[in-house]
């Protein structure tokens, strides 16, 4: 009888806790739990942004998307927030010569980003934190955010941009095997990260099929051209993915998750940004009154 009662209470308890434990992903929530998700997240939505582009000869086309998806999923286990579903519309014109690249026109990616933020806010979130995984996006994202001051918005957007952590960087450099400066797109670090998150998708036997070395085909140090990346890395591969390990991936991801959780807590507690934005919009509106 005792065992029976124990089992019954365990069952009831697990059922109870299941009902309390709401998913973080927007697409996995039932609508009737949405108010609870808003409250639990302090009206904060994580907006992971990836891309579809070749990642060397060995890592999946959705590497950046998979990276931010996993990163956010791990972070919300420690600090709850709602996570916007898969989004892979960004700036990737420089990889249009490679198979699998999904590069929409610039006006469309701008409008899509603005409309997505507006829709997230219309659903009750007044804080959106962008978690970007793609190296070709920051300039676009920063310009988009500067433009938010052009008209009144009832929400704040935060772009997660971690500062250098000296202690971590020192340990990272020690473990790192390839040339640090050349380790960029699908190189040792990014490949290690994916090897940790999704080893099933990696084709490590192909990592040395192509060169990820800088080809240095143009030399205009003081001038910016749109072809700069292609001139250096025509294989859309920068670094040595073959030197990646799952262990190094765990080291990188443990740090990136912990750092993001810290920022997420700061955003959830922040009221100042919205207050200052409103003060700014009021002054704009009252300029000549
Ligand atoms: Zn990438």
Image (tube, grey):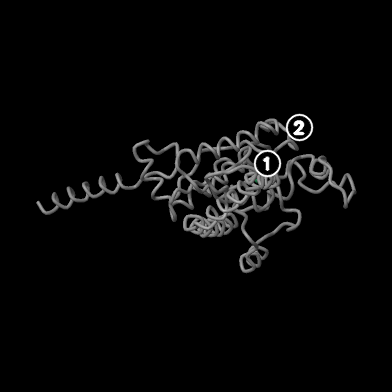
Residue farthest front in this picture: 289
Q: Which mark is residue 55?
A: 1
Q: Nearer the viewer, residue 135 or 149?
A: 149
Residue 36 at x, y percent in the picture: 36, 45
For marks 2 and 1, give the CA distance: 13 Å
| Residue shown at the point (43%, 51%) measured from the top left | 42
How many tags in the picture?
2
Please name the residue shown 62% across and 48% down the image: 289
Query: Looking at the image, which residue sits at the far left?
Result: 1
Q: Earlier in the sequence, mark 2 or mark 1?
A: 1
Mark 2 touches mark 1? (CB < 8 Å): no
Q: Which residue is mark 2?
A: 97
Q: Foreground mark, 2 or 1?
A: 2
Q: Position of residue 253 (x, y in %)?
A: 56, 55
In-front residue for pair 208/68: 68
Number of residues whose C-alpha sits closer than 10 Å to that of mark 2, classed few (under 14), some (14–19) or many (20 or more):
few
**Coordinates of residue 75 in the picture (x, y in percent):** 48, 53
- Find numbered disc 1 in the image and state the secondary structure of the residue it sits on: loop
Looking at the image, residue 188 lies above or below residue 94: below
Q: Quadrant of residue 103?
A: top right
**Circle 2 sits in a helix, a strand or a loop, which is it?**
loop
Disc 2 under 8 Å from ligand 1? The reply is no
Q: Is residue 86 left or right of residue 208?
A: left
Density class for disc 1 (Cα within 10 Å; few <14, some 14-19, many ≥20) is many
State the image coordinates of residue 88 (x, y, percent, origin top left).
Answer: 60, 37
Compared across the picture, whether 144 is left or right of 219 comes to left
Q: Residue at x 77, y 44 (%)?
A: 211
Q: Is mark 1 within 8 Å of ligand 1?
A: yes
- Pick the residue in front: 3 or 51: 51
Q: Which mark is on residue 260?
A: none
């Amino acid at each position: 009888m005792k065992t029976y009662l124990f089992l019954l209470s365990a069952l009831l308890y697990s059922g109870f806790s299941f009902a309390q434990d709401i998913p973080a992903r927007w697409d996995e929530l039932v609508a009737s739990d949405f108010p609870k998700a808003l409250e639990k997240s302090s009206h904060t939505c994580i907006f992971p942004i990836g891309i579809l582009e070749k990642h060397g000869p060995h890592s999946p086309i959705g590497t950046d998307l998979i990276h931010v998806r996993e990163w956010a999923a791990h972070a919300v286990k420690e600090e709850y927030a709602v996570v916007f579903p898969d989004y892979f519309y960004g700036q990737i014109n420089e990889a249009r010569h490679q198979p699998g690249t999904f590069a929409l026109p610039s006006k469309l990616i701008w409008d899509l980003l603005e409309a997505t933020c507006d829709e997230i806010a219309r659903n009750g979130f007044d804080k959106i934190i962008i978690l970007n995984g793609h190296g070709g996006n920051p300039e676009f994202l920063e310009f988009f955010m500067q433009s938010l001051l052009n008209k009144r918005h009832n929400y704040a957007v935060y772009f997660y941009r971690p500062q250098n952590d000296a202690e971590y960087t020192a340990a990272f450099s020690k473990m790192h095997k390839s040339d640090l400066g050349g380790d960029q797109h699908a190189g040792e670090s990014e490949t290690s990260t994916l090897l940790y998150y999704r080893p099933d998708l990696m084709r490590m036997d192909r990592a040395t099929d192509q060169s990820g070395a800088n080809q240095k085909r143009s030399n205009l140090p003081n001038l910016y051209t749109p072809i700069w990346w292609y001139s250096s890395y025509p294989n859309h591969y920068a670094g040595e993915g073959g030197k990646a390990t799952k262990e190094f991936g765990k080291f990188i991801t443990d740090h990136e998750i912990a750092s993001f959780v810290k920022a997420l807590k700061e955003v959830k507690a922040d009221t100042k940004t919205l207050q200052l934005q409103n003060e700014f919009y009021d002054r704009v509106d009252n300029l000549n009154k």
